[in-house]
Image (tube, coloured by chain):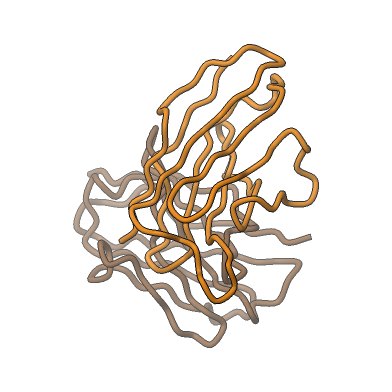
Amino acid sequence: DIVMTQSPDSLAVSLGERATINCKSSQSVLYSPNIENYLAWYQQKPGQPPKLLISWASNRESGVPERFSGSGSGTDFTLTISSLQAEDVAVYYCQQYYNSPRTFGQGTKLEI
Amino acid sequence: QVQLQESGPGLVRPSETLSLTCTVSGVAISDNYWTWIRQPPGKGLEWIGYVHDSGTATYNPSLKTRVTISLGTSKNQFSLRLNSVTAADTAVYFCARENGWNFESWGQGILVTVSS
């Protein structure tokens, strides 16, 4: 299994400030034939299912605010929220879809 | 608009079988991977497995001996069966649609408690 490890486990950021969440995979999720990273980011608010924010490591889903961005390649990835808004308080998960079983990071709790 | 809805008992006794159904609307069952994911209270997400519209299923090795995911008799449903449950199987169970890559649609989740 590919182990996904996020850091930090929790993070407190002031409104309007930048938030950065890291995700490291135990093996590369970069698929060489198409040069794509098989990694997604999700946001989960209390009492709700996760919501897909970013796929292919850096492709923002339709309707996701531009302040959310993803970067990285291979085994090291980052989710950045450029200017934190109150509605961004949530738990964030990275997930690999390079192979089965699909695996998630342990989650990062983002607070204000 | 794609919608998924989990249904089933919220309480299951230890050693018995957990059975859940996911009803899908707004999209055909074809060409997707219909997935179950669970989340113990206050913890992270665990992928249980999926069934493809061909009927082929793939499971998490950690649960493989106890789990069955199948397409329902109704064309817009799929189901989860988990045998020999213990308290460690207490979780919110989500059904989701994987497009072959990531989970783009989710149900609201159903809390299943294993207790006598």
Left/right placement of residue B20 relative to residue A14 reads left
Q: Does B66 sit above or below residue B85?
A: below
Residue sitting nearer the eye, A67 or B30? A67
Q: Position of residue B37 (x, y in %)?
A: 45, 56
| Number of callouts | 0
- Rendered orange, the chain in question is A
Quadrant housing the N terminus of chain B: bottom right
- Rendered brown, the chain in question is B
Which residue is drawn at the image coordinates 59% and 25% (left, top)?
A19
Q: Quadrant of residue B101?
A: bottom right
Residue sitting nearer the eye, A90 or B13? A90
Quadrant housing the C terminus of chain B: top left
Q: Position of residue A98 (x, y in %)?
A: 46, 66
Q: Quadrant of residue B53?
A: bottom right
Which residue is drawn at the image coordinates 57% and 61% (left, top)?
B102
Q: Position of residue B49 (x, y in %)?
A: 41, 67
Left/right placement of residue A47 relative to residue A66 reads left
Left/right placement of residue B4 relative to residue B42 reads right
